[in-house]
Image (spheres, rainbow, N blue to C red):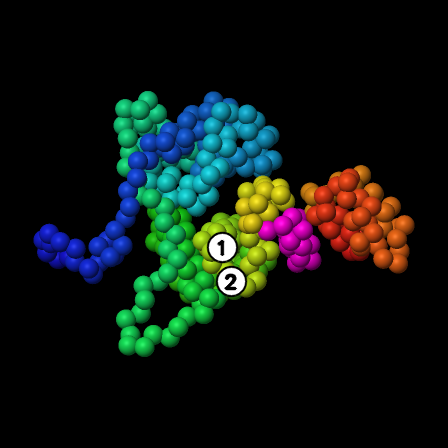
């Protein structure tokens, strides 16, 4: 600061206290750059959101309509989250590997340096993606012990700040113009994961809802999943984590159960709870009409004690979790 020349760690600034960890970004850059080239060959404008969706193997209708699911790089980056890809793409932009063609609808284009990376002639170094799960401990004599919920809220607040920072950087605007700290703090406490709830946050109007609603509600859900995967638990989030993997990662019930080390029927219970809360899930996504009719017929035979009898009757015809969701649907009808 102010002309100081330091030769050792100052133990004071953000960089010295939390030095960034660098990694070889060649492979990730080649995935992204190759995807840009292949998307353009499909005569499709390649914006950031389309690029990340292709890399992660999204099942969005727009991707299939443009036949982007058929290109070689579709799904090659599904191991990284949306926010990890946004983190790295911003660095590729700053490193000059890609550029934004503002005269072509803000489409991404590979630069001369980017082509060198594709050909293996240049190896970019990038900063690793890190989830900040704890704020620095307050330096007081007798700090108040935080509850698990308070720890989660603080960690989520820091995560949302990183998302805001990257979004502001991509728009070239100050961070507060995306959302104020007060708005992010409110999000971290109330955790809105549906758009109608997000609209209730102070500072969110229709315009910001449309512009940032999906980005931040998805960020909240993804952070729940990341936080949980590290062995942390917060009450009231388990069914929401299931929703994230089903809806955004397009995973099946058995896949989510295996990932979360839960049984299929527990995931089915999460699904019915989500449906009660009007999340964007339909019974037909999990149980087809033929299966539902089988459950309905079996249920009709055992009016006095249908639950266990239906499971016993159909155990060799379909999975128990499907019967669970089907029984829920019939009770709800």
**Residue 148's spot in the image, x, y percent?**
46, 66
Residue 161 visible at all: no
Bin the neighbour count of mark 1 within 10 Å (Cα to Cα): few under 14, some 14-19, many 20 and up: some
Q: Residue at x 31, y 27 (%)?
A: 117
Please state the extent of the stretch shown in magenta in the rendering: 262-281
| Residue furthest to the bottom | 142
- Please state if 186 lies on the left or on the right of 300 as rendered: left
Q: Is residue 117 visible?
A: yes
Question: In the image, which disc is placed on residue 153?
Answer: none
In the drawing, what numbered circle is on residue 234?
A: 2
Query: Residue 118 location, x and y as percent?
Result: 35, 25
Comparing 174 with 216, the one in front is 216
x and y, in percent, of residue 4 in the image: 10, 56
Q: Secondary structure at mark 1?
A: helix
Using the image, determine if residue 175 lies above or below residue 36: below
To which residue does mark 1 refer? 228
Q: Is residue 229 above or below residue 183?
A: above
Label 2 or label 1, whichever comes before in sequence order: 1
The quadrant holding residue 292 is: top right
- Residue shown at 72%/47% (left/top)? 320
Residue drawn where x is 36% and y is 31% of the image: 27
Q: Toward the viewer: 265 or 197?
A: 265
Q: Residue at x 57, y 62 (%)?
A: 236
Q: Is residue 83 left or right of residue 259?
A: left
At numbered mark 2, what does the secondary structure look like: helix, strand or loop? Answer: loop
Evaluate if marks 2 and 1 touch, with contact meaning CB atoms under 8 Å apart: yes
Cα separation, mark 2 vs mark 1, equals 8 Å
Q: Is residue 309 above or below residue 150?
A: above
Q: Nearer the viewer, residue 62 or 206?
A: 62
């Amino acid at each position: 600061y102010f002309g100081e020349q330091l030769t050792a760690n100052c133990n004071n600034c953000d960089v010295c206290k939390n030095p960034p960890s660098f990694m070889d970004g060649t492979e990730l850059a080649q995935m992204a750059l190759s995807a840009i080239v292949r998307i353009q060959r499909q005569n499709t404008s390649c914006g950031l959101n389309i690029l990340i969706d292709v890399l992660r193997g999204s099942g969005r209708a727009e991707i299939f309509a443009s036949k982007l699911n058929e290109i070689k790089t579709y799904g090659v980056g599904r191991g990284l989250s949306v926010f990890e890809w946004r983190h790295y793409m911003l660095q590729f932009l700053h490193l000059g590997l890609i550029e934004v063609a503002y005269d072509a609808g803000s489409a991404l284009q590979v630069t001369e340096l980017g082509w060198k990376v594709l050909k293996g002639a240049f190896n970019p170094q990038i900063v690793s993606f890190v989830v900040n799960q704890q704020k620095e401990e307050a330096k007081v004599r007798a700090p108040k012990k935080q509850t698990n919920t308070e720890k989660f809220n603080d960690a989520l607040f820091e995560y949302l700040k990183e998302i805001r920072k990257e979004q502001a950087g991509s728009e070239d605007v100050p961070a507060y113009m995306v959302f104020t700290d007060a708005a992010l703090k409110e999000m971290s406490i109330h955790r809105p994961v549906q758009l109608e709830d997000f609209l209730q946050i102070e500072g969110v109007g229709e315009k910001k809802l449309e512009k940032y609603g999906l980005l931040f509600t998805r960020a909240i859900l993804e952070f729940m999943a990341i936080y949980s995967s590290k062995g942390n638990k917060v009450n009231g989030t388990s069914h929401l984590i299931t929703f994230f993997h089903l809806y955004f990662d397009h995973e099946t019930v058995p896949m989510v159960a295996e990932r979360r080390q839960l049984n299929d029927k527990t995931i089915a219970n999460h699904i019915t709870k989500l449906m009660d809360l009007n999340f964007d899930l339909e019974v037909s996504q999990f149980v087809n009409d033929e299966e539902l009719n089988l459950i309905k017929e079996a249920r009709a035979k055992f009016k006095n004690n249908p639950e266990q009898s239906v499971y016993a009757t159909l155990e060799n015809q379909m999975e128990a979790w499907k019967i669970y969701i089907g029984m829920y649907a019939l009770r709800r009808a």
